[in-house]
Image: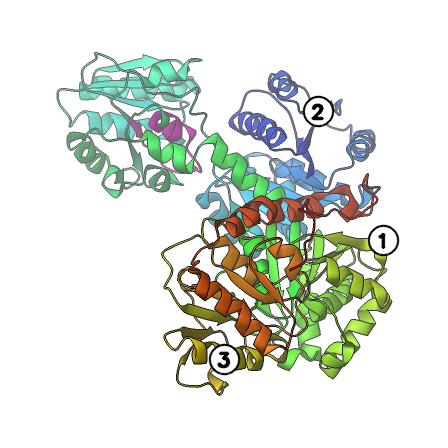
Amino acid sequence: MNTAFIIRDLGHGGAQRQLSILAAGLVREGHAVSVLHFYGGTFEQNLREGGVKTICIGKKGRWDLLGFFFRLIKAARSVQPEVVHGYLAESNLMALLLRPFCGFPRIVWGVRDSQTDAHLWGTLGKLSFRLNCLLARFADVILCNSKAGRDYYLAKGYPAHKMHVVPNGIDTERFKPSRHDHPLTFGLVGRMSPMKDVATFIKAAALVSGARFVVVGSGDEGYAKQMRELAESLGVKVEWLPAQGDMPAVYATFDCLVNASAFGEGFSNVIGEAMACGVPCIASDVGDSAWIIGQPEQIFPAGDHAALAKCMREFKPSETRPRIITEFSVERLIERTSRLLSKKVLWITTGLGSGGAEMMLAQLVNGLPKLQHVVVSLTAGGKHATSLPNVHSLDMPAGRPTLSALWKLFRLLRREKPDVLMGWMYHGCLVASLAKLMRFKQAPLIWNIRQSLYDLKLEKRGSALVIRALAWLSRLPKRITYNSRLSSKQHEAIGYAKSKTRLIANGFDAARWRPRTPVRGLIGRFGRNAPMKDYATFIEAAKLIHARHPDTRFIIVGAETHTLDVPPFIEVLGERHDLPSLTSSLNIAVSSSAFGEGFPNVVGEAMACAVPVVATDIGDTRWVMGKAGRLVPPRDPQALADACIGILESGVTQDPAARERIEQHFSLTSALHQFESLIISKASHGRQETESTPITPRISPLTSH
């Protein structure tokens, strides 16, 4: 995404340091990033070195308002942001005001504190705080760097469904473990302020013998003097050090860092930095300290010096760095933020059942973690409903639209504000087209057709009407993807816009679908019970095979297959969830479809398992199989039986060439890459695209069988 950050200044400060780290990291991830700032600052050079464009608005004074805002608008429009991300309260308001002047980008607010001190700011400060609380509902996303901050602002009226916690990132390359020869040392790091509650640290130290105590920090000299006097009165020897520039060297002198803060703590950077240096921490139960440390026995109630002393006396060294690397590293900061700033894709699908199209949708949503996904199913339930994040059902009875379903869709669109609309299967494409008309912000629409189309008379009446309607509406989407060559030609023949065609074949996870030891003489037919699957032909072929080879076993797997009338030597297993192991156990996999197949998943899955395949020459089966397996005409039980008998009598139980073909031409990685490119490409936003022809995978020449 093209993201513009807004921040007051780039001087020394935790927020400025985090912005510098984050912006440079987003650039490395492929985002275009700009930082608009009111004044300059020391971090401006760091940003430029990280490839971040910086623009100084040059605010000339407190009352430079109108001219400043016009300059800010000009700067923001010059970078054409898709996301405007405010950093801190004042900048959050500016980000919101910029929205209508920059083409209505997504607005992200950054909350960097856990408890405002607006009461100390005077009239303007209080007004700014009230405005933030009133206008927070108009932001699209609100990112808090602490759970404590999120909870505080939730209580002030911020919208819960828009708030996300993205904790600070600790630079684990800078903060590394090192050893020292000092006696057991407890250190406290923080500015001299009542908030840091140095008094509790000193009182606890008075109850601990045989240890060294260090306090590092500058700030309120009056408070610092009081703390020195307290230590002297209690007979506690404390080494007092001013704020240091080389903090890794400071942490290297500690055995344990103590954070005694009484209030106001959000995400404590000093705790994260110390832990990255391999220094265990003890902290008051304020802000996110307990979450960062992750060890309850090292947390004490704020202000309770006796409890702190007990923690110090019972202190034992422990491994801390792995937790920071796993949960609070710069990489995790960038990963979490990148995901929340990335494009939001709203998938609208007919259903989430057990079919191949539904499985491919699940693989795409789960396989593209750098995008945000919202899945809307027209019907309730389904095999994949629980395996996908952020799923919503419109609860349409048998796919028929209702007023309540349309209202639910409208509310979802208003709340989620997707950047891309993806229609999946015919009815999903139709409703996605309706969603585009409901969406005030221009969002590109992409249709995904997942079957071939031999004859509209073979379709249900309602489906046939939808298919014809989509032909008339096919100028709406920016792209129409097909998973088979034949499907694209068939749909173009009835009026689907040819210029919108994009061919993306299904992909198979070769790690999941892999060869195992097959069962000799086991023949399987997998797929739901539907007319297009033509189970009747398979059953008749099985009878012919069984007459020739009585020891042959047959299994049928799929939804609604329990209603089939089969002879005793065919076992009907119904819908199963262990398809990879079942598929790899086969001696022969059969696809007997009579029509409607676009890209046959069962064929690709069997090939990935190196299982010999016998399939009817329907859809793009010939293209998928290449030289592997055997093709037969549809609705011909004898031909199907002869092909299976030929494989059985040859003694072949595996087909390594079939797996090799899947790995080379139909991998899941390739499909994911093509869909990701389609979603994030300029073409999906209606801008000029360099390619004028559909992209097709490179394949070997088709051969006859």
Residue 544: image tag: 3
Residue 143, by quadrant, is: top right
Q: Amino acid at mark 1?
A: Ser
Sequence order check, earlier mark of 3 and 1: 1
Tell me the SS state at disc 2.
strand
Disc ID at residue 53: 2
Residue at which label 1 appears: 499
Q: Residue 541: percent from the left, percent from the top?
A: 53, 78
Quadrant where the C terminus lies?
A: bottom right
Label drawn at residue 308: none
Q: Position of residue 359 (x, y in %)?
A: 55, 62
| Location of residue 614 (image quadrant) | bottom right
> Magenta segment range?
257-275
Compared to residue 520, the image places residue 456 above or below, namely: below
Marks 2 & 3, CB-CB < 8 Å contact: no
| Whole-percent x, y for residue 196 in the image | 37, 30
Spatial separation of the CA atoms under disc 2 and disc 1: 37 Å
Crowdedness near tag 1: few (<14), some (14–19) or many (≥20) residues, C-alpha within 10 Å: some
